[in-house]
Amino acid sequence: MALSTMIHTHLPPALSGGGMNRISAVYAHQGVASDTKLNRGARRLAESLTTLLNLNIEPLCSRKNLQYSNWDSFDDEKHNTPTTSPKEMIADKWRELHGSSDWEKLLDPLHPWLRREIVKYGEFAQATYDAFDFDSFSEYCGSCRYNRNKLFEKLGLSKNGYKVTKYIYAMSAIEMPQWLERSRLMDTWSKDSNWMGYVAVSDDEETRRIGRRDIVVAWRGTVAPSEWYEDFQRNLEPIGIGDAKVEHGFLSIYTSKNEFTRYNKSSASEQVMKEVTKLVQFYQGQGEEVSLTITGHSLGGALALLNAYEAAVNFPGLAVSVVSFGAPRVGNSAFRAELDDLGVKTLRVVVKQDLVPRMPGIVFNESLQRFDDITGTLEWVYTHVGAELKLDVSSSPYLKRGFNPLGFHSLETYLHLVDGYLSAESAFRSSARRDVTLVNKACDMLVDELRIPQCWYQLANKGLVCNEHGRWVKPRREPEDIPSPTGEQAHDLSLRIEMQESYKCCMQAKNLAIC
């Protein structure tokens, strides 16, 4: 049985067109049909994979070191405390937190200021899932459900102090298994493109707190990362002018465009670089210190590396860093060396039990470097980049054990583990504040004692509303939430007109003063 049939992402089934049929019943409903041939095959696959990859996954019955014998008291304790701690002023330490010293002495033990920043960027990446329209019966399937001015407000991220300035759309010139969400309807907003992320920038208050004007790019992951095992292992293609090579599928999503499409007349690369260029030039022109932080989960982490490479080439001296979660390998050792030479700082957050960070190159990878003296540099071998923060599902008393690739790869599982991480030798921190309930948004990872339903995150009534006649219907989107490239162009035009008018007023005032 192909691995692609066994492993799926954490995307909310209620938001995806296929509902629960996208998620193997082996993992979505543990214990149901446990004696079927499919389950026996799954267990055999799990055993072989854990042996091959040294995942050290515990059986379901071996939950140990649970901190609570009375889970009702846990509810009372957690439900009556805030989910975040007060923000610290980190302006004096921002370069270290941004990776200037490759996070040396900040990861083990994990510095509390760095923990908060990792969670912040992880929540920016999670927003690309929470706001994505997965409903294949929606004419807007594959788009963002909200316009950029409402995105953070709708998702409760306004507290982070950033403003979204641009949405990014992507397509692929090659067949990419299941990465592109499409509507089942004939008349849709786009048959070629998906919303893949956004660009945001810190506001004045957050800029003072973190010590610089921070531009963020957040990239969305894919629907079926398991397909990398079959499709993304072999094909590396050149990038840049040296020996660097990257996986052809990732590069295709990042660079593909077509004049006959509505949303990808320019590629994702061109869209994001145009916006980053505008923001960097504007804020540096104001005399401000500027950083670029790129984040993403799963496929989004791969796109983040490609984005960082291009940004570093175009902006020498700009502080560029990547914070990725559960990201696969992207390129060869020459690609890693070029990123290092360009000054790109990469922090990879990985979960030990997650299979995706081990792909592509599940066998032939950077571990072969020990044989360089014999083989020479192998240009076709995939290699990870940057520093690694390694997490372990078994460290949390709130998470189930057993083979659960859906839960292991979920970004919410990652953020839960980051929030509770102190050091490689320490227990899960008792003062962790992030809401544990979020872990089960799109998977079944929390222990049953917490009584949190699996895959609970969905639109109310799965998106249906009762109209004035008492009929349940799909609502129409508000005009401002309908994806429209002409709308963005109109916004840019109005902004240019506003700037021109402001310039005219200034000149008139100057002339009057001279007179």
Image (spheres, grey):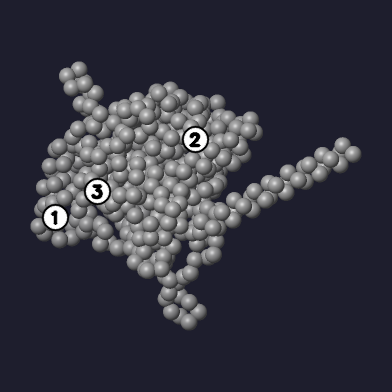
In the picture, measured across the screen, residue 417 lies left or right of residue 60, that is right
The one nearer the camera, 146 or 237, is: 237
- The answer to whether the residues at label 2 and label 1 have Cβ atoms under 8 Å apart is no
The earlier-in-sequence mark between 3 and 2 is: 3
Q: Which residue is mark 1?
A: 39
Q: Which residue is mark 2?
A: 292
Can you tell which of label 2 and label 1 is closer to the viewer?
2
Residue type, label 1: Asn
Residue for point 22% across, 36% down: 361
- Give how far across and how far down residue 141 sits, in percent: 39, 61
The one nearer the camera, 96 or 75, is: 96
Residue for point 42% across, 76% down: 472
Residue type, label 2: Leu
- Give how far across and how far down residue 37 sits, in percent: 9, 57
Residue at the extreme top of the image, as rendered: 373
Residue type, label 3: Glu
- Give how far across and how far down residue 21 sits, in percent: 25, 62
Q: Secondary structure at mark 2?
A: strand
- Give how far across and how far down residue 401 sits, in percent: 23, 45
Residue at the extreme right of the image, as rendered: 515
Give me the disc on residue 227: 3
